């Protein structure tokens, strides 16, 4: 497939076979049985997750955010529950040099109002120094609160690239759950929707019918060199493949209200 991802084509390869509505409905209902079993197993796993034991941690440990050092307890914002994404960090890297996988995860959590309404707060933690983190957050346009946990021990600090859940009981704080790898996909609704489409994610590892297009293996830290999964593509605002100081993931340049390129990439400018 030589078309640019995101554009239309009149000659898509490996299209699904064409059948009448009744034949499609029968096949759809057969798959639905498996989907319902998958959903019910997910419900059972979630029930077991809610029954996991928990471990207490020091809620007074300080993390650094836009208002300076604050106790971790403050991240609950007075609510009982807290979900955090622990974002990887590369010291001294330009904005586009931060982890593409973490970038994608953080991008999909732009607004936590529905979590908040359910009594759950959300924050992004990272091991980067706050002055670098603050510039990066401004560059990317993130709206949720970020905190530097540099030098803080696990589970608040430590290894990044995880989703973690915490429970507050007065001034006591407990870790209840943590996941990483594909467990982080719960935040990324785009991947879930792509899994519903006929061409899926387009990655090489997927089990696809013969002739379906494959973008290729996902590789972090590379510009859009031909056949690369869109969540790792980098370009400037004009669509030129680059890993330079004005690059962002391609989908973020094309979103409504994207920040013009001339205001970006000033590494030394403090917002």
Image: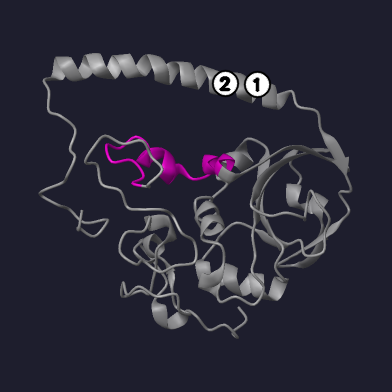
Corner quadrant of residue 239: bottom left
Depth check: 147 or 76 in front? Answer: 147
Region rendered in magenta:
182-202
Relative horizontal placement of residue 168, taking residue 145 as reference (left or right):
right
| Percent coordinates x, y for residue 266 in the rendering | 53, 84
Tell me the number on the disc at residue 47: 1
Quick check: can you spot residue 187? yes
Position of residue 80 relative to residue 21, above or below, is below
Depth check: 229 or 53 in front? Answer: 229
Q: Which residue is mark 2?
A: 43
Relative horizontal placement of residue 152, taking residue 216 as reference (left or right):
right
Position of residue 6 relative to residue 57, above or below, is below
Tell me the number on the disc at residue 242: none
Question: Quick check: marks 2 and 1 in contact, CB under 8 Å?
Answer: yes
Is 230 a magenta residue? Answer: no
Dot 2: few (<14), some (14–19), or many (≥20) neighbours within 10 Å? few
Residues at marks 2 and 1, CA–CA distance in whole angstroms: 6 Å
Relative horizontal placement of residue 5, taking residue 269 as reference (left or right):
left
> Residue at the location (58% across, 71% down)?
136
Colouring scheme, one of rainbow, by chain, secondary structure, one colour: one colour
Corner quadrant of residue 230: bottom left
| Percent coordinates x, y for residue 221 in the rendering | 49, 66
> Residue at the location (58% across, 67% down)?
137
Is 185 a magenta residue? Answer: yes
> Residue at the location (45% across, 79% down)?
244
Relative horizontal placement of residue 168, taking residue 134 as reference (left or right):
right
| Percent coordinates x, y for residue 181 in the rendering | 58, 45
């Amino acid at each position: 497939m030589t078309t640019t991802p995101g554009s239309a084509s009149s000659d898509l390869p490996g299209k699904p076979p064409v059948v009448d509505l009744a034949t499609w409905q029968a096949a759809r209902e057969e798959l639905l049985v498996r989907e319902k079993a998958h959903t019910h197993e997910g419900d059972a796993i979630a029930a077991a997750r809610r029954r996991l034991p928990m471990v207490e941690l020091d809620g007074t440990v300080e993390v650094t955010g836009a208002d300076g050092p604050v106790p971790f307890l403050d991240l609950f914002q007075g609510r009982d529950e807290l979900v955090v994404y622990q974002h990887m960090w590369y010291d001294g890297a330009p904005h586009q040099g931060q982890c593409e996988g973490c970038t994608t995860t953080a991008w999909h959590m732009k607004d936590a109002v529905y979590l908040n309404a359910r009594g759950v707060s959300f924050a992004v933690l990272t091991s980067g120094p706050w002055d670098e983190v603050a510039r990066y957050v401004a560059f990317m346009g993130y709206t949720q609160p970020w905190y530097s946990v540099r030098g803080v021990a696990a589970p608040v600090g430590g290894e990044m690239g995880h989703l973690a859940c915490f429970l507050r009981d007065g001034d006591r704080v407990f870790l209840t759950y943590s996941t990483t790898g594909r467990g982080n996909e719960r935040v990324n609704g785009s991947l879930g929707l792509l899994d519903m489409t006929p061409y899926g994610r387009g990655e090489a590892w997927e089990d696809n019918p013969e002739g379906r297009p494959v973008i290729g293996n996902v590789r972090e830290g590379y510009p859009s060199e031909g056949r690369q999964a869109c969540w790792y593509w980098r370009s400037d605002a004009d669509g030129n493949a680059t890993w330079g100081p004005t690059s962002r993931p391609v989908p973020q340049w094309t979103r409504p209200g994207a920040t013009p390129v001339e205001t970006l990439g000033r590494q030394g400018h403090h917002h």
